[in-house]
Amino acid sequence: MTRLTIAIPSKGRLQENTHDFFGRAGLKIQQPGGSRDYRGTIKGLDDVEIAFLSASEIARELAEGSVHFGITGLDLVHETIADPDRSVHIVTPLGFGPADVVVALPKAWIDVETMADLGDVASDFRNRHGRRLRVATKYVHLTRAFFARHGIADYRIVESAGATEGAPAAGSAELIVDITTTGSTLEANNLKVLRDGVILKSQAHLVASLSADWSVTALAAARTILDRVAAEETARGMRLVRAVVADPAKAFAEAARLGAELPYGTPAAGAALCLLCPKDAVPDCASLLIAHGAETASVETPDYIFRRTNPLFDPLAAKVDGR
Ligand SMILES: Nc1ncnc2c1ncn2[C@@H]1O[C@H](COP(=O)(O)OP(=O)(O)OP(=O)(O)O)[C@@H](O)[C@H]1O
Ligand SMILES: O=P(O)(O)OC[C@H]1O[C@H](OP(=O)(O)OP(=O)(O)O)[C@H](O)[C@@H]1O
Ligand SMILES: [Mg+2]
């Protein structure tokens, strides 16, 4: 039976946060051969194999179906995978690795502030210089699609693997499409982003391949992992609030308006009412219980909240089954 393979970044800026993400869910990634080993495991989960790859390789392997899950940037998913809606399923954004793919050009081009301005300049440029504007980028597909959407055809792509921001100053291109987070690399190269020049807002995502071999074993392992991930995520936003009140049903009816849940039912007379309450509503919830006669309301932080329905796993299972 095929085991579940998860590809995670082995280097670069997504690596450390990826380990933290699994760690929060109580999943410990082990790399038996040390950092040079290409394969690893998750402690206690025999049906799972970890593949350590670069962020761009991960997008490729997801497209090929040679891994079940991968963690990579949304920019790479859209750049590398021809038809992402069909070949992969986005499980969840991960809240780290934020970066925008942008169209940028020298600040000295004061008349060009928007994609429409760029369209005008592109035609002019061709007439005047007898050659097309050059765009330096490694995001070839994203650039083509975005320029086409803005009706710009008078340009040529110059593929650039690194130091793309230096291309205009070096004279190898007039403008660039690249990724930026703080903007300091653009600034250092005297470049500005067009007002409507943000092609994609990216961050790291957990992505599932729809062409992978989803054996019963692999799917069960996916459920185990996504249960833990979802349980930790849910728990992070909730608190357990406990108090003995005069009329638990009535107290809960009011607490429900604050978003509280009654996970273990209405207590018998004299026993504590136990509520799951959104973190931000805890002080109001506690005051409400005191107003309902409680002497004490105690609040605890749950580590995990497991539920029968899993918002991360269920949509994936539906897609995999439906193939
Ligand atoms: N400021 C940033 N610059 C570049 N990438 C970023 C940034 N912030 C987040 N990322 C994300 O990290 C991904 C890859 O980053 P990084 O350049 O660290 O990987 P890498 O190990 O160099 O991979 P490769 O060798 O394939 O380029 C990007 O595609 C993007 O999704
Ligand atoms: O907006 P900023 O915060 O300045 O970040 C953007 C820069 O960081 C990335 O390069 P990276 O460091 O990954 O080097 P690489 O091109 O070798 O991958 C990216 O290609 C930009 O050059
Ligand atoms: Mg890089």
Image: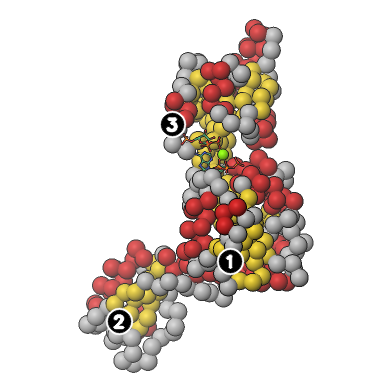
Q: Quadrant of ligand 1?
A: top right
Q: Measured from the top left, where is residue 203 in percent x and y?
A: 53, 47
Measuring 50% from the left and 35% from the top, which residue is drawn there?
180
* Residue matched to label 2: 243
Q: Nearer the viewer, mark 3 or mark 2?
A: 3
Measuring 27% from the left and 78% from the top, which residue is drawn there?
297
Ligand 2 within 8 Å, label 3 CB: yes
The C terminus lies in quadrant: bottom right
Ligand 1 within 8 Å, label 1 CB: no
Looking at the image, residue 23 lies above or below residue 303? above
Does label 1 or label 3 sit earlier along the sequence? 1
Looking at the image, residue 142 lies above or below residue 225? above
Q: Distance of mark 1 from mark 2, alpha carbons?
A: 39 Å
Q: Quadrant of residue 244?
A: bottom left
Residue type at tag 3: Ser
* Residue matched to label 3: 184
Q: Residues within 10 Å of mark 2 (few under 14, many from 20)?
A: many
